[in-house]
Image (cartoon, rainbow, N blue to C red):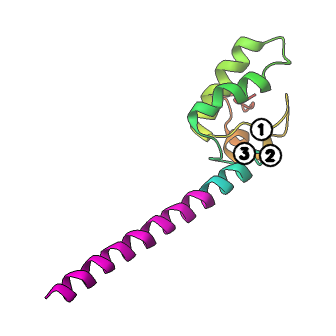
Amino acid sequence: MALAGRLLVLLAVALLAVSIAEHKAFASRTEEQRKDNEHQGGHGSLKIYECKPKCDYRCSDTKYRKPCLFFCNKCCRTCLCVPSGFYGNREECACYNDWKTKEGEHKCP
């Protein structure tokens, strides 16, 4: 009976060790993927809290800063993407690129 108890404890410890190792491997993979996506743009590559600094940079070189920030942040919250640079590069974010006004102009700066 004591042997069975010891085997059960040993099995539980082994399962715990495997679970911890898997968790660490998964966490490091997701961290690497997050770092890769940081510079790529693309739909869904940002978290909502990352929209403001990305839009601040994108709109920093325009004389229409207030409307640029308003629409950039609105688009980013929906698309989770902001194209690189101050202007253009909309092809990096399909959602951002495809969102149009009623007049057919780009809604996102």
Q: Quadrant of residue 14?
A: bottom left
Seen at 65% across and 25% down, the residue is 52
Closer to the camera: disc 1 or disc 3?
Answer: 3
Q: Gap between marks 1 and 3, in whole Å?
A: 12 Å
Instruction: From the viewer's perspective, tell me whether residue 24 is left or right of residue 18.
Output: right
Q: Residues within 10 Å of mark 1 (few under 14, many from 20)?
A: many
Numbered badge on residue 103: none
Closer to the camera: disc 2 or disc 1?
Answer: 1
Between 86 and 4, which is closer to the camera in this rendering?
4
The residue lying furthest to the front in this view is 2
Which SS class for mark 2?
helix
Q: Amino acid at mark 3?
A: Glu
Q: Gap between marks 3 and 2, in whole Å?
A: 17 Å
Q: Which residue is mark 3?
A: 38
Numbered badge on residue 83: 1
Which comes sooner in the sequence, label 2 or label 1? 1
Q: Amino acid at mark 1?
A: Pro
Q: Gap between marks 2 and 1, in whole Å?
A: 8 Å
Seen at 32% across and 79% down, the residue is 10
Q: Amino acid at mark 2?
A: Glu
Q: Main secondary structure of the magenta part?
A: helix
Q: Residues within 10 Å of mark 2 (few under 14, many from 20)?
A: few
The residue lying furthest to the left in this view is 1
Which SS class for mark 3?
helix
Quarter holding the C terminus is top right
38 inside magenta stretch: no
Q: Which residue is mark 2?
A: 91
Q: Which residues are magenta?
A: 1-29
